Image (cartoon, rainbow, N blue to C red):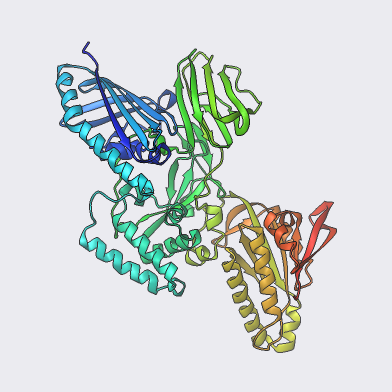
Amino acid sequence: MFREYYYRWTFDLKSSPEDLWPFVADTNRFNRDTGVPPIEVDDARKPLRNARRKVHLSIHGMNLEWEEQPFEWVRPIRFGIERVYSKGPMARMRALAELTAKADGGTRVTYEVHAQPRNPIGTIAIPLQMKLISGPRFRAAFQKYDQLASQGVSPSLSDATAALPESDQSRLNLLGERLIKESAQLETSDARAAVERLIDFLRTGDDFSVARIRPYELADTWHISRRLLLETCLRATRVGLLDLRWDLLCPMCRGAHDAGSTLKELPGNIHCATCRVDIAANFDQFVELTFKPNPGVRVVELDNFCVGSPQRTPHVVVQQLLPAGDERVLELPLGEGNYRLRALELPGSQIVNVSPTGAPTSTVTLSESGWSNDVLNVSGRSSFSLVNKTNAEQLLILERTAWTDQAATAAEVTALQMFRDLFSSEALRPGEQISVGTLTVLFTDLRHSTRLYREIGDATAFGRVMNHFDVLKKFIAERDGAIVKTIGDAVMAVFRKPVNALMAMLDAQQVLANPSDGVMPLQLKAGIHAGPCIAVTLNDRLDYFGSTVNMAARLEGLSNGGDVIISRAIFDDASVSDLLNSRDFEAAPFEMSLKGFEEEQIELWRVRKLNV
C-alpha cells in the first residue's frame, strides 16, 4: 500500500460564490480547460447503482479506468467527487472544491485533491502531474472564471479556445447578410443587431455553448426580445446558418435527449437510464426546440470530459450519497419556493416548502416504508438533518420543482405563425398523438358570407374573403398566435395566452367592420376557449383536437359578429380580467347548454369593444 498524496490550493477571487458557481461547478468545462483528455463512458444506458459509471481515458500513453462515484454538492458552497481506479497509476482519487464568501466581498475557493497511488509509477507520476501541470492550470482556470463572473459574462457566452478558419468566417458573414436581406421584418435596427450578435456568437462562442443554442436563454443574456431572437434563429435555419432540433427532456434530471431534427423523428417516449424513468413526449414541457450551427458554417464535435457535473442539473441544489445507517447534517442556503427531496433508488419523494416562517431545523428520515405525505416547511437558512435508515446506500437529491421558463417548448413554438409559415411540413408521425398542455383555441367565421357572394358576385366576394384571411393572419401573428387551418370562410388558430387571442380578435373585428377603402364591411364571429389539447397530424400538417377544440368551435357559433364569445377559462385569466375591467370593453355574462356538453349549463361571456 502506497501512501496517499494530499494537495490543497486556495484562490482569493473577486466574485461571489453564487456568480462563480455556474463556472466552477461545470466540471465538464473545468476538466477540458485544465487539460484533462476526453473520457469514454462504458454503456451509458446501463448505469451502476446510484448513478455510478465505468469510465476510461488515455493520458501520456497510459490507460486509466475507474468507477465514477456520484458527485456530492451543496449549491453554491461545495462539491466533490471520488474515483476508484481499476487501471492506471492511481488506486483512488478524491477532489473537493469549497466556495466561502469573504467578509470584505469576493470568495475564497479551496480546492483539495487526495490521490492514492496504485504502483511505483503512481508515486512518481502523481506528484509531477499535480505540482508541475495540474496546479498551474487550476489557478489559470479559476482566475479566468473569476474574470468572466466579475464582468457579468454568462458561461454560455465564453469565447472559443480557437478561432474559426477564414473560409468559415466568410460564409458566416455572407449568410448573415442574406438573412437580413431576405426578410423585410429584419430591416429594423433591433433585428439587424440580433442577427449581428448571433453571427458573432457563432464565430466566437465556446463549443459547449454553440452546440446547443437555447434562444430564450441567449436572449435573456443579451437583454433582447426573446421573440425576436427565436424568429431570427428560425429564419437562420432557412438560409443555412443553423439546424434546428427537438430535445426530449427527462422530467427528473431534465437532461436533454436529442430526439431529432423534425417532429416526425420525435419518439413517443424514451428511457432516461440515469433516472430510470420512461419519458413521454409532452409538447408543453418536455419537448424543447434548440439550434446548432449548420455543419457547412461551423463543425462542432463535442467531447465529454466529465460524466456527472453538478452544473448538468442546475435545478438540483443538493446531492448527497448516504451509506446505510448514516446521518448527515447540512446547513442549506435555499431560496423561497417549492422543492422536492427524493432518492434515486427509492420510489416517491418528500415535498419541501421554503419560506421565511419555516422551521430553522428539520430532520428527514429515509425508511423502507417510504416518504412522508406531509409538506416539510423550512426556512431559507435551514439546518437539514438527513438520516438513512434503509438497508442500502441512498443518493439523495433536493431539487427545485419549478421549471425554467427559458425553454422554447414545442407547444409554444408550434403555436407561432412564423413557425407554421417557415416549416409547414413539420408534422408528427402518422397516428402519433402528443399532449401539448393548455392552449387557447380560437374559431372565427364570417357572418352572412353566403349573402355576400350573392350580393356582390362570386369573384368580388372571394377576393374579400381572401383579404379577410390576410387581416386575421396579421393580427394573429402580431399577438404570438398561429392559424392552424382554414375551413371555407372559417379559421382555427391557437395561442399560448388567452389575452392575446381576445385582443387579436377584437382588433380584427374593428378593422373588418370599418374598411378604409369604402367596400362593404364584414362582420366576424369569434369564439375562444382554453384547455388541454392533443397534437396530431392531419392532411400532412400539425393539427389539434380534443374537447377544448370542440368547445371553441361551439362558442364561435354563438357569436353575432363584432363580438367574441369566451368561456370561463378565458374570463378567469388574470390578464383578460385586467383588460375587461377597463372602460373600453363590455363583457355580458350568460349561460346555456351546448351540443356535446349537455350535462351542465356553461358560463359564457359576450365581449365587445366599445366605441370610445
Question: Does residue 78 appear to the left or right of 336 in the view shown?
Answer: left
Tell me the quadrant of the picture where the C terminus can be found: bottom right
The answer to whether 38 is drawn above or below residue 541 in the figure is above
Residue lying at the far front of the rendered structure: 104
Residue located at (69% from left, 54% from top): 574
Name the quadrant containing residue 592: bottom right
Q: Position of residue 447 (x, y in %)?
A: 75, 75
Residue at screen point 34% across, 62% down = 199
Give the mark count.
0
Residue 211 visible at all: no
Name the residue at 53% across, 23% down: 384
Tell me residue 60's x, y (percent): 16, 32
How far across and down, in percent of the image, does residue 278 sit? 52, 36
Q: Is residue 149 left or right of residue 88?
A: right
Q: Nearer the viewer, residue 270 or 609?
A: 609
In depth, the one of 364 and 476 nearer the eye is: 364
Image position of 349 (left or right of 224): right
Viewer-proximal residue among 85 and 100: 100
Q: Is residue 582 left or right of residue 292?
A: right
- Quadrant for the N terminus in the image: top left
Can residue 249 be seen in the rendering of this structure? Answer: yes
Q: Residue furthest top?
A: 1
Residue 316 to residue 548: above or below? above
Counting from the top left corner in percent of width and height, residue 604 is at 80, 59
